[in-house]
Amino acid sequence: MKIALMDSGIGLLPTAAAVRRLRPDADLVLSSDPDGMPWGPRTPDGIVERALAVARAAATHGPDALIVACNTASVHALPALRAELEPGLAVIGTVPAIKPASAGGGPIAIWATPATTGSPYQRGLIRDFAGSVAVTEVPCPGLADAVEQADESAIDRAVAAAAALTPRDVRTVVLGCTHYELVAERIRAALQPPGLPPVVLHGSAGAVAAQALRRIGTLPGSGAAANSRLTVLLSGRESTLSDKALGYAEGRLLQAVSPAH
């Protein structure tokens, strides 16, 4: 079994780690686009073009499923990816976890990139799944880029700025960008004033990983991780996990159980 994941950068790591935990025996293909990132400032057509190139590079390795582990690409490129690759290759998009976050009754906040915050896509999800709760949309300028570069001080500044825009009574936060899950504990700490209940963060990685397995008719299992393979593609070129990727626990998990190819 082989699962491919794609993103502009290292935002695919949380979902890849979630797949690894569910199926240690799965071969993984991580396809990203350092030559073309960031995707956020590109036009929708530009995002589709880059996403298709990254997906095609992954598809040459014969995966059973392709996870679009990127909110921006899922918004703009998912129809084009499915039109080209399905039904031969199952394509699974990433949707912010607004529905499960709102199940507790709110209020909730959604941290997302400035391009996604206030977008028709996000507003549609709020309307469909969180219409009965109070929702605060929080733009997080620079946070994804800071996470991508593993810039500690920039991460702290971006998290602090977003926390300042989040109402104090919000105890449930949706992480609406896959990069944010790499610094979830830092976000939780910034949102945890003394005396208030713990903050619950809702990412998408676990649910998306489980959905990918369901799409290919596979259940979570406990196969031997030692026999699995990790292929890293950087704008189509085979490489290894970068030092920045290995700076995060998810990257180290992948490196620890998979020989890089």
Image (spheres, rainbow, N blue to C red):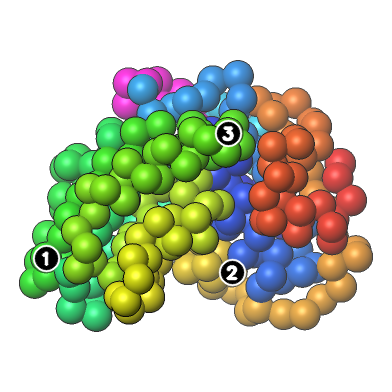
Q: Label 1's element?
A: loop
> Is residue 128 at all visible to an observer of this figure?
no
Looking at the image, which residue sits at the far left? Answer: 132
Q: In the structure shown, which secondary structural element does the residue marked by tag 2 occupy?
A: helix
Which amino acid type corresponds to the residue marked 2 in the rendered image?
Answer: Leu
Residue pictured at 52% horizontal, 67% vertical: 206
Q: Quadrant of residue 141?
A: top left
Badge 3 local density, few (<14 within 10 Å), some, or many (20+)? few
Image position, residue 27 (x, y; %): 77, 57
Is 147 drawn above or below residue 238 in the view shown? below
Q: Is residue 13 visible?
A: yes
Answer with left or right where residue 221 lies relative to residue 85: right
Residue carrying label 2: 213
- For badge 3, the amino acid type reads Asp
**Residue type indicated by callout 1:** Ala
Q: Quick one: label 1 or label 2, which is nearer the N terminus?
A: 1
* Horizontal and vertical percent position of residue 158: 40, 39
Give the extent of the magenta segment. Answer: 42-51
Q: Earlier in the sequence, mark 1 or mark 3?
A: 1
Residue marked by disc 1: 134
Q: Position of residue 18 (x, y in %)?
A: 62, 64
**Coordinates of residue 189 in the picture (x, y in percent):** 45, 61
Q: Which of labels 1 and 3 is toward the front?
A: 3
Vertically, is 167 above or below 68? Answer: below
Q: Are marks 1 and 3 in contact (CB under 8 Å)?
A: no
Q: Residue at x 81, y 52 (%)?
A: 255
Residue located beneath label 3 in the image: 151
Label 1 to label 2, Cα distance in Å? 33 Å
Viewer-closest of 77 and 100: 100
Crowd rating for badge 2 (residues with CA inside 10 Å; few <14, some 14–19, many 20+): many
